[in-house]
Amino acid sequence: MARVLSGVQPSGEMHLGNYLGAVRQWVSHQQEHDAYFCIVDLHALTIEIEPQHLRERTLDAAVNLLAAGLDPALCTVFVQSQVPEHPRLTWLLECTTAMGELRRMTQFKDKGRGQEDVRVGLFTYPVLMAADILLYDAERVPVGDDQRQHLELARDLAQRFNQRFGTTFVVPDAAIPQVGARVMDLQHPERKMSKSVSSPLGTIGVLDDPADIERKIRKAVTDTDGDVRYDPSTKPGLSNLLDIFAAASGRRPQEIASEYQRYGDLKRDAADAVIELLRPVRERHGEYSADLSGVRAVLETGARKAHEVASATYLRAAEAVGLLMR
Ligand code: TYM
């Protein structure tokens, strides 16, 4: 069985972009793959966060992943900081990474823009992400489109390490969905839906109640030409709604566009499709949040399993670079 790994930051409620771009793929991957899913709490430290919030959100993220359909009998769900090999391998990889490679990362440029004291952790963030992936010999990494560049770096680092120190890592491939890989903000369709940018009307949470989802889609920014057509460059708001509708219903956005004459009708049916898509997530969320000790037990087992794989890979890498083994 091919190995799959992916991760999500515990930085607030899971939104529709996370779900359509990544987590929904994880749920289907767990059936036919040896799948590892990681809540990346160390990555969340790269921006200011209250310690108590971080702890709560880490547990919330686990509840949300289980509610979204990850089944601990089929996959391994764990918290990054509970497997100490992640920062250990990061160091080995940092010692093979050039500053210029990290300076080119668009996410670093976006997040660091306007900040006076950019943290070193924000700069080296993609190397930690590469370590997350390479520790598990992951062949496939299901992510949204915004992680494409980070995946390229992980591939480069793996190839370079293998060339310099002998074959140590599996070179991973990104698995990016055809539709839903880039869900945009409903109020600002030129930027992606995100939990770090505060845009309450622009972001649909996977736990939003149906009335909120309906309201947010009804108020979504479109345009004034009144023509229902899929054209992301000239009609970004409407095309985003078509993308969301398509991803929620398993159809093509162009095909959906051809069936509507009025924005209002399209919005109504898109909202219904999203509400139905998220209904089971909301229902299961109630069950898991009432059993936090059960969720903690899932994470405990997950960390143990993840550690077994990660420690073997780390030792291989440490020996390859010439560290003296005990
Ligand atoms: P994060 O926590 O920002 O997002 C988790 C996943 O959701 C996807 N995503 C989106 N997809 C479509 N439309 C959107 N608007 C949208 N917003 C987010 C992301 O592409 C991602 O797949 N660096 C990663 C976490 C990470 C990771 C890893 C991922 C750390 N280590 C190892 C894969 C493998 C991040 O910040 O994702």
Image: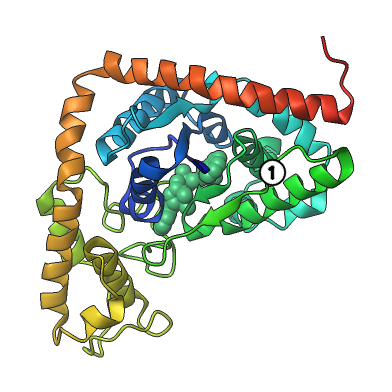
Q: Is residue 307 above or below residue 159?
A: above
Q: Is residue 238 above or below residue 315?
A: below
User: What x and y, as percent, mark residue 285?
Assistant: 20, 33
Look at the image and tell me in which quarter the C terminus lies: top right
| Number of marks in the rendered image | 1
User: What x and y, as percent, mark residue 261?
Assistant: 14, 87
Q: Secondary structure at mark 1?
A: helix
Q: Is residue 40 left or right of residue 172?
A: left
- Residue farthest toward the top in the current orientation of the protein: 326
- The answer to whether mark 1 is within 8 Å of ligand 1 is no
Displayed quadrant of residue 32: top left
Q: Residues within 10 Å of mark 1 (few under 14, many from 20)?
A: some
Q: Is residue 82 visible?
A: yes
Nearest the viewer among 35 and 239 is 35
User: What x and y, as percent, mark residue 269?
Assistant: 12, 69
Residue that numbered label 1 is attached to: 123
Residue at image location 19% in from the left, 58% down from the top: 274
Nearest the viewer among 246 and 15 is 246
User: What x and y, as percent, mark residue 131?
Assistant: 66, 36
Three-letter amino acid code at disc 1?
Phe
Q: Is residue 223 above or below residue 65?
A: below
- Residue farthest toward the front in the current orientation of the protein: 1
Displayed quadrant of residue 309: top right
